[in-house]
């Protein structure tokens, strides 16, 4: 449970309370419950492990000490004496807030005012000392079921017309996907930079969309707007569900915003996918046309690979890098850059580049060069347009050891969802929030992520203090031993 002072600090730092108050209609008499009090009440209710019910928010507010109730307006002096906040007043204020932040014609996407409010609230939950701890973000989406039942099979409306049918992974061996009725919840979680110091995995951005909309293009504007708020984008780690999208919906806007992509490639996007001026296009790079095809068809290393298999895999990816055309310039404002033949850069030996034949024989040698060399072999350099590798280009060669180590940070997004789905912390399963509609669900979910950030910060500070005490005593920092078990481990284990 977070203290009331922390909840109020996050609310005040976000600045959404006065902005939202200005959007609310003026009533005949002053409302007893203000937005400035409602938001901390929501945080207190969710921080105490309670579900996202307005009755729990009301209980959290009326359960405060009398002095805090009077300060926050929960207990007010009316004409006939003190008046304690009622549930109907809490429900009324919350309904006004969601109506002001929502759309007049709901379409399954958050209104700009709602998205800005949620961005401000999440960013305010990150203390100033940790905002610059890392510029890398791991992104993912998950399912969020609506409390409403789906529409009848014979047709008709339901209690939540913005919700829709979607697919989710159930991690069961007999069934890969299953249907659910609700929304897609997207989140960006801060992870440590490459070669950087450790950083807490705090949620920086989130959004909610109906399952009838693609969650990737819906989340892209949320990320690309971060530099406008003074938050530079670094590494963006995503799985193949993001990289497989149209470049204009994901990769191109993020690169234009200054982000560097580190992503898994969909099986359909792996391996050779055509040529550009004679050079083979594969896995986000251009390769010499004489590259062995087996080197371009390498799949990511399996999780169950042995150290020997990992060493062999890394040796093959390192050999494939020798055939890659080397970059000479950065991307210009239009996304163009120049590359050079690997033989011209001294990475391989090729008869078409006589100077390369004087190199040491530890380099790969092209024994059968193309009979009719194209531009990649005859020109000194090549100009690569932005659309040539727009979909699959990324920071590290795929699937090299450097890519594997960097991509491993993406699990921070999965851990972020695991904490809010944990029954002991949040459990955002069906019935967690019995309100219907995108605006109420997104507001409650954002508050839950803000509460999660506060828990993560408390645990982070405790670990840092413990490490400082151990360092003062000459002891190394405390580490956690992790044991990996596969799903088949119990079945293959030896009997006792």
Image (cartoon, rainbow, N blue to C red):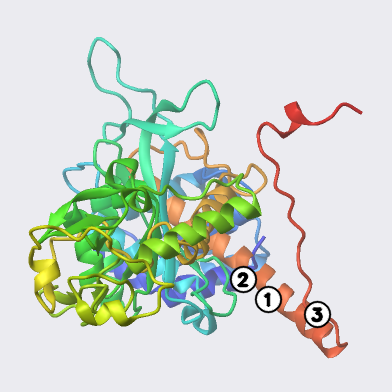
Q: Residue 158 occupies which quadrant of the picture?
A: top left
Q: Is residue 374 visible?
A: yes
Q: Residues within 10 Å of mark 3 (few under 14, many from 20)?
A: few
Asked if the residue under mark 2 is in contact with the one under mark 1, i.e. CB atoms within 8 Å, the reply is yes
Find disc 3 in the rendering and name its residue. Answer: 476
Q: Residue 6's spot in the image, x, y percent?
A: 58, 72
Question: Looking at the image, which residue sits at the far bottom?
Answer: 472
Q: Is residue 78 visible?
A: no
Q: Residues within 10 Å of mark 1 (few under 14, many from 20)?
A: few
Lower sequence index among marks 1 and 3: 1
Q: Residue 23's spot in the image, x, y percent?
A: 25, 63
Q: Residue 213 occupies which quadrant of the picture?
A: top left
Q: Residues within 10 Å of mark 2 (few under 14, many from 20)?
A: some
Element type at mark 1: helix
**Cα distance in 3D space between marks 1 and 3:** 17 Å
Q: Nearer the viewer, residue 423 or 340?
A: 340
Element type at mark 3: loop
Q: Residue 156's spot in the image, x, y percent?
A: 23, 17
Find disc 2 in the rendering and name its residue. Answer: 457
Find disc 1 in the rendering and name its residue. Answer: 461
The residue sitting at 59% across, 67% down in the picture is 454
Where does the C terminus fall, quadrant-wise? top right
Q: Nearer the viewer, mark 3 or mark 2?
A: 3
Lower sequence index among marks 3 and 2: 2
In the image, is 394 to the left or to the right of 337? right
Q: Which mark is residue 147?
A: none
Where does the N terminus fall, quadrant-wise? bottom right
């Amino acid at each position: 449970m977070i203290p009331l002072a922390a909840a109020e600090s996050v609310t005040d730092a976000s600045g959404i309370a006065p902005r939202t108050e200005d959007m609310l209609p003026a009533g005949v008499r002053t409302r007893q419950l203000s937005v400035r009090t409602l938001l901390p009440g929501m945080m207190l209710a969710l921080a105490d492990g309670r579900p996202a019910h307005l009755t729990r928010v009301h209980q959290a507010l009326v359960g405060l000490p009398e002095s805090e109730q009077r300060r926050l307006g929960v207990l007010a002096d009316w004409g006939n004496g003190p008046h304690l906040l009622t549930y109907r007043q809490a429900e009324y204020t919350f309904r006004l807030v969601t109506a002001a932040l929502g759309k007049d014609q709901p379409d399954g996407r958050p209104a700009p005012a709602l998205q800005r409010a949620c961005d401000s609230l999440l960013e305010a939950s990150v203390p100033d000392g940790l905002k610059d701890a890392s510029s890398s973000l791991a992104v993912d989406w998950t399912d969020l079921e609506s409390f409403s039942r789906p529409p009848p099979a014979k047709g008709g409306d339901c209690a939540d017309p913005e919700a829709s049918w979607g697919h989710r992974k159930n991690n069961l061996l007999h069934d890969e996907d299953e249907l659910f009725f609700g929304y897609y919840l997207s989140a960006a979680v801060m992870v440590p930079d490459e070669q950087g110091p450790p950083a807490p995995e705090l949620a920086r951005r989130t959004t909610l969309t109906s399952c009838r909309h693609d969650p990737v293009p819906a989340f892209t504007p949320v990320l690309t707007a971060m530099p406008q708020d003074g938050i530079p984008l670094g590494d963006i780690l995503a799985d193949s569900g993001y990289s497989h999208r149209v470049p204009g919906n994901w990769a191109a806007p993020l690169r234009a915003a200054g982000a560097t992509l580190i992503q898994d490639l969909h099986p359909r996007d792996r391996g050779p996918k055509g040529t550009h001026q004679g050079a083979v296009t594969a896995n986000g790079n251009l390769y010499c046309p004489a590259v062995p095809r087996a080197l371009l068809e390498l799949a990511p290393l399996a999780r169950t690979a042995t150290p020997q298999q990992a060493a062999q895999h890394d040796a093959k990816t390192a050999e494939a890098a020798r055939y890659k055309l080397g970059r000479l310039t950065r991307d210009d404002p239009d996304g163009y850059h120049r590359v050079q033949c690997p033989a011209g850069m001294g990475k391989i030996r090729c008869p078409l580049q006589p100077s390369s034949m004087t190199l040491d024989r530890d380099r790969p040698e092209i024994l059968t060069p193309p009979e009719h060399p194209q531009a990649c072999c005859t020109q000194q350099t090549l100009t690569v347009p932005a659309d040539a590798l727009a979909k699959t280009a990324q920071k590290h060669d795929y699937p090299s050891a450097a890519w594997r180590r960097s991509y491993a940070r993406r699990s921070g997004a999965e851990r972020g969802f695991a904490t809010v789905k944990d029954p002991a912390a949040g459990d955002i399963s069906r019935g967690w929030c019995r309100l219907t509609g995108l605006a109420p669900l997104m507001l409650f979910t954002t508050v839950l992520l803000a509460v999660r950030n506060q828990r993560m910060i408390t645990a982070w500070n405790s670990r840092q203090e413990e490490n400082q005490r151990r360092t003062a005593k000459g002891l190394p920092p405390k580490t956690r031993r992790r044991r990996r078990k596969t799903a088949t481990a119990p079945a293959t284990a030896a009997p006792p």
